[in-house]
């Protein structure tokens, strides 16, 4: 019985070692928290020895505000932009001769996959891309409650939303700074 237990223990130890070897070859996808599109986020991205990529996703945000309209009492208004904000991505050093990329697409959710070179350390900065294509179509029922501070001279309301790295392969994201 003692010999059987020793052999069984030895087999289990080898099985554990063998299974850990299988697991270490698989890299888990890195995902970040969701960031407000008004913030500029800078991160350090280090790629591994295989092809690396990161998928960035931006979504339009639903906003709710309750206001007290004197005689009429409190009323709650809800608004979601008709399109997700476009985001600009600055990559240093450049990838394929390009340093600037944009989240492409239309609709309330847009995404782009950034393909990076192997064995390289990048500084990536993601920020809001102010452009007329980023304007939010508001209607009169919102009473201009949303998009504070954007109406300067004329009612040019830009889309509000959030973005995140939704999926990545063969890279490590560190040193995330938000400003």
Image: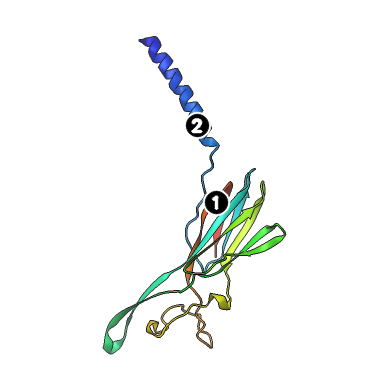
Residue 68, above or below 34: below
Local SS, label 2: helix
Identify which residue is drawn at 39% across, 84% down: 143
Q: On the rendered image, what quadrant is the C terminus found in?
A: bottom right
Identify which residue is drawn at 47% across, 79% down: 137
Image quadrant in which you'd find residue 66: bottom left
Question: Residue 13 at what x, y percent from top left?
Answer: 46, 23
Give the residue pinned by disc 1. 168
Please tell me how many numbered marks the rendered image carries: 2
Instruction: State the residue lying farthest toward the right.
Output: 97
Identify which residue is drawn at 27% across, 87% down: 72
- Specify few, some or many for label 2: CA neighbours under 10 Å numbering under 14, 14-19, or 20 or more: few
- Specify few, some or many for label 1: CA neighbours under 10 Å numbering under 14, 14-19, or 20 or more: many
Check the image and tell me how it is coloured: rainbow
Question: Residue 88 at what x, y percent from top left?
Answer: 60, 66
Local SS, label 1: strand
Q: On the rendered image, what quadrant is the N terminus found in?
A: top left
Identify which residue is drawn at 41% across, 81% down: 145
Question: Residue 41 at what x, y percent from top left?
Answer: 56, 62
Alpha carbon separation for disc pair 2 and 1: 22 Å
Question: Residue 166 at what x, y percent from top left?
Answer: 50, 56
Give the residue pinned by disc 2. 20
What label sits on residue 78 in the rendered view? none
Residue 99, above or below 65: above
Instruction: State the residue lying farthest toward the front.
Output: 106
Q: Please report whichever mark, 2 or 1, sits nearer to the chain's N-terminal start.
A: 2
- Is the Cβ of the residue at disc 2 closer than 8 Å to that at disc 1? no
């Amino acid at each position: 019985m003692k010999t059987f237990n020793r052999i069984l223990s030895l087999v289990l130890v080898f099985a554990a070692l063998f299974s850990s070897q299988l697991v270490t070859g698989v890299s888990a996808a890195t995902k970040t928290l969701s960031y407000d599109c008004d913030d500029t986020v800078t991160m350090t991205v280090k790629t591994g020895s295989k092809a690396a990529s990161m998928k960035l996703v931006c979504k339009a945000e639903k906003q709710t505000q309750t206001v007290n309209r004197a005689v009429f009492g409190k009323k709650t208004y809800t608004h979601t932009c008709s399109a997700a904000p476009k985001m600009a991505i600055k990559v240093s050093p450049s990838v394929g001769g390009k340093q600037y990329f944009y989240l492409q697409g239309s609709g309330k959710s847009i995404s782009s996959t950034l393909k990076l070179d192997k064995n390289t350390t990048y500084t990536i900065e993601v920020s809001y891309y102010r452009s007329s294509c980023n304007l939010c179509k508001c209607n009169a029922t919102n009473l201009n409650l949303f998009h504070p501070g954007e109406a300067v001279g004329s009612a040019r309301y830009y889309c509000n939303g959030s973005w995140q790295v939704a999926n990545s392969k063969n890279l490590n994201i560190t040193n995330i700074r938000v400003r």
